[in-house]
């Protein structure tokens, strides 16, 4: 039982969410990568122009390649619980699912995995509480400040030294 608790203490939910987003990005990136490797092997690595080198890319595969690469990068931001990374990951995944369902009309396994990832991101939205990538590396503020920094109660005024308004007000008239 202590081993399970030790693992739970060391592994945060952010690792799981970041892993889901990274896998999703890799799955979007993989078809272009496979086709590029096969094309390079077929041409035996001899390219004369950039057009030949990139001829394996279809026009509609370029956005999937870029989205997959950006999702891989956003998974690094999710590790530090960045809300910006959370938002852009969610936005890219929703856009990918919409393109697959409404434009291509060919949902596949990656589309349904994207839906699961969207659900996990939506479920854990409150846990991504760092508003910038730089704030993820800063420590949390202390909830209990040291004794010398605690707010001291305000001193109460001495009732004998209070000047009442009805007792000899000092007025200067010109």
Image (cartoon, rainbow, N blue to C red):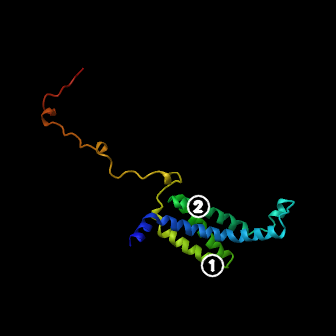
Q: Position of residue 58 (x, y in %)?
A: 77, 69
Q: Position of residue 157 (x, y in %)?
A: 18, 37
- Whether 60 is drawn above or below 140: the answer is below
Secondary structure of the residue carrying numbered label 1: helix
Q: Is residue 44 left or right of residue 164?
A: right
Q: Position of residue 102 (x, y in %)?
A: 65, 76
Q: Residue at x 68, y 75 (%)?
A: 103
Q: Quadrant of residue 100?
A: bottom right
Q: Quadrant of residue 66?
A: bottom right
Q: Are discs 2 and 1 less than 8 Å apart at CB?
A: no
Q: Quadrant of residue 98?
A: bottom right
The mark found on residue 25 in the picture is: none
Specify whether residue 173 is in view: yes
Separation of residues labelled 2 and 1 (CA atoms): 21 Å
Seen from this angle, which residue lies furthest right? 48
Which residue is identified by label 2?
74
- Whether 37 is drawn above or below 50: the answer is below
Seen from this angle, which residue lies furthest top? 174
Q: Residue at x 83, y 64 (%)?
A: 45
Which residue is identified by label 1?
109
Secondary structure of the residue carrying numbered label 2: helix
Q: Quadrant of the N terminus?
A: bottom left
Q: Residue at x 40, y 51 (%)?
A: 141
Considering depth in this image, is 110 or 171 the residue closer to the camera?
110
Q: Is residue 119 left or right of residue 70?
A: left
Q: Position of residue 156 (x, y in %)?
A: 19, 40
Q: Residues within 10 Å of mark 1 (few under 14, many from 20)?
A: few
- Whether 103 is drawn above or below 143: the answer is below
Specify whether residue 58 is in view: no
């Amino acid at each position: 039982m202590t081993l399970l608790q030790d693992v739970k203490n060391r592994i945060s939910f952010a690792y799981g969410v970041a892993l889901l987003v990274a896998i999703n990005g890799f799955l979007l990136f993989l078809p272009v990568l496979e086709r590029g490797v096969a094309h390079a092997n077929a041409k035996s690595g001899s390219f004369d122009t950039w057009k030949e080198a990139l001829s394996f890319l279809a026009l509609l595969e370029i956005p999937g390649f870029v989205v997959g690469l950006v999702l891989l990068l956003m998974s690094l931001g999710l590790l530090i619980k960045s809300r910006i990374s959370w938002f852009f990951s969610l936005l890219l995944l929703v856009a990918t699912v919409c393109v697959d369902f409404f434009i291509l009309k060919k949902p596949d396994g990656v589309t349904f995995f994207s839906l699961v990832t969207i659900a996990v991101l939506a479920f854990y939205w409150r846990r991504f509480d760092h508003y910038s990538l730089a704030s993820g590396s800063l420590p949390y503020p202390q909830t209990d400040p040291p004794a010398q920094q605690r707010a001291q109660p305000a001193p109460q005024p001495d009732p004998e030294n209070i000047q009442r308004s009805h007792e000899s007000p000092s007025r200067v008239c010109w």
